[in-house]
């Protein structure tokens, strides 16, 4: 289990111990709920535990204030357990379809920060890579600001916690943007080309030499062409002046040549003592890739917790951004590139899975998925079906009617009679399917 913040070795005070005990109890209850795949999550269970968590947060705030430990830098094991609880609750809220509520954003912010830290370590990114994260942070900022306005002078504890996470991400984003902002417009295409080459070289580093060699040769040609653009080792703009951003672009060019040499050299990219870490990352990446393909039907957002824990364990093996071998020395540059590439790829896949989460409770997902499939079929029929008779359209009409008949007083209910989240999304899909069906029926009448 983990916290994403570095911990100073402060001990748990006597006043903090009851809070820690209760947090551990909450975490264990959440872990038990997560393992129960035979039943849907009950909103009352999750929200009830969450309210209990908030009481502990207030209690901790009072203890830390009285002990003068209420600054953000003060950390101990209690903070690690609290972070785990909030991440788990965030995943549960996503599973319940409560995507637009503050708790659901916490785990996304944690994952965004993990991505930013790896981008900062590798330096391989463009503004386009940052844009999706920037847009999501702006959306979360609007949500938090609206909550703060409603709360007035006493913001809720979860708002304070998420606000701190958000500020951390916004600060990291600003630093990343500053790196590319100094590059001149004329030099930016060269920088973006080098980023693409550097990424391909990193991807090639995990392949067998015979497989990687042909593409490596082509990348070498492109690097030489870029290098030939320099005049006296500098890139010049159209006015004959030294283009702004030399440090970033020349540094990336030289680093790309070094990685090219590593890829073209014979031998394994990863030394034997680092092979278990490499194989573990490859396995995690394969599993996450599969989830990305099948997530709509098989993924429970809480399933991502185990991947978060595994990735954090591997990330914790790095010191100053580098993996170290059994001798304590940093792993070779090619191994660093391969391992960091896989780690970042896994973090990015986790973020994509979180971002693809629909604001629909898992109890409604079967209906939601059926309607999505039916909508796709109707679109295909409209596009390619040709003249259709009423008999041809009857199966679609029956399926739509059977789904519509699941409603009670206009609402889709769960097995216990509660109204799950996502009614608006599902109703929108239902109405869209009806509209498509009526269009096809009208076309049949006209013909």
Image (tube, rainbow, N blue to C red):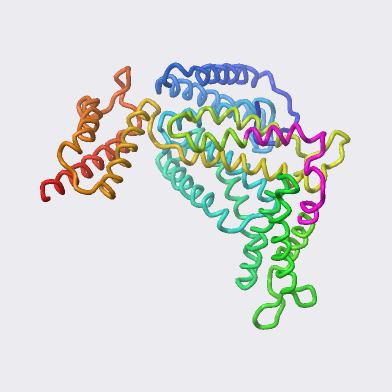
In the image, residue 112 lies at what x, y percent?
58, 43
Q: Residue at x 54, y 35 (%)?
A: 290
Of 95 and 336, nearer the camera is: 336
Q: Say whether residue 126 is magenta.
A: no
> Where is residue 169 drawn, in percent x and y?
59, 46
Residue at point 60% right, 52% down? 173
Q: Quadrant of residue 23?
A: top right
Residue 143 image-quadrant placement: top left
Q: Is residue 282 magenta?
A: yes
Q: Residue furthest right?
A: 327
Magenta region:
260-284
Q: Residue at x 43, y 31 (%)?
A: 297
Above or below, 398 relative to 44:
below
Residue 134 versus residue 402: which sits nearer the camera? 402
Q: Position of residue 138 (x, y in %)?
A: 48, 50
Q: Who is closer to the viewer here, 319 or 208?
A: 208
Which quadrant holds the N terminus?
top right
Dividing the picture into quadrants, the one containing residue 257 is bottom right
Relative to 172, does residue 66 appear above or below in the rendering? above
Q: Is residue 339 above or below residue 308?
A: below
Across and down, in percent, residue 386 comes to 23, 49
């Amino acid at each position: 289990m983990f916290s994403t913040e570095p911990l100073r070795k402060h001990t748990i005070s006597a006043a903090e111990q009851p809070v820690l005990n209760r947090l551990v109890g909450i975490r264990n209850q959440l872990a038990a709920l997560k393992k129960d795949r035979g039943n849907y999550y009950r909103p009352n269970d999750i929200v009830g535990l969450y309210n209990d968590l908030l009481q502990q947060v207030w209690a901790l705030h009072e203890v830390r204030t009285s002990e003068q430990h209420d600054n953000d830098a003060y950390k101990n094991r209690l903070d690690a357990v609290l972070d785990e609880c909030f991440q788990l609750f965030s995943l549960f809220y996503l599973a319940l379809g409560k995507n637009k509520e503050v708790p659901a954003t916490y785990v996304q912010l944690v994952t965004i920060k993990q991505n930013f830290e790896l981008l900062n370590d590798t330096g391989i990114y463009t503004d386009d890579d940052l844009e999706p994260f920037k847009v999501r942070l702006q959306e979360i900022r609007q949500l938090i600001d609206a909550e703060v306005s409603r709360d007035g002078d006493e913001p809720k504890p979860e708002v304070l916690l998420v606000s701190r996470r958000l500020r951390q991400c916004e600060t990291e984003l600003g630093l990343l943007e500053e790196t590319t902002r100094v590059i001149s417009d004329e030099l930016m295409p060269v920088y973006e080309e080098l980023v693409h080459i550097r990424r391909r070289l990193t991807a090639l580093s995990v392949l067998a030499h015979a497989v990687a060699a042909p593409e490596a040769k082509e990348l070498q040609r492109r690097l030489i062409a870029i290098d030939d653009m320099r005049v006296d080792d500098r890139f010049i703009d159209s006015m004959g002046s030294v283009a702004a951003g030399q440090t970033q672009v020349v540094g990336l060019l030289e680093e790309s040549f070094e990685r090219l040499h590593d890829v073209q050299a014979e031998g394994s990219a990863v030394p034997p003592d680092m092979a278990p870490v490499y194989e573990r990352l490859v396995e995690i990446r394969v599993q996450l890739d599969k989830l990305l393909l099948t997530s709509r039907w098989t993924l429970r957002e809480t399933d991502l917790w185990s991947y978060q824990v595994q990735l954090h364990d591997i990330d914790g093996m790095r010191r100053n951004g580098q993996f170290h071998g059994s001798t304590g020395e940093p792993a070779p540059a090619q191994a660093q590139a391969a391992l960091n590439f896989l780690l970042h790829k896994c973090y990015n896949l986790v973020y994509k899975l979180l971002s693809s989460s629909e604001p629909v409770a898992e109890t409604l997902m079967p209906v939601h998925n059926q309607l999505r499939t039916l909508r796709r079929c109707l679109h295909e029929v409209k596009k390619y079906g040709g003249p259709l008779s009423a008999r041809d359209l009857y199966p679609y009409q029956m399926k739509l009617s059977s789904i519509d008949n699941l409603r009670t007083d206009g609402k889709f209910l769960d097995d216990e009679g509660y109204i799950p989240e996502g009614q608006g999304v599902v109703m929108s899909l239902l109405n869209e399917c009806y509209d498509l069906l009526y269009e096809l029926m009208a076309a049949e009448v006209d013909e």
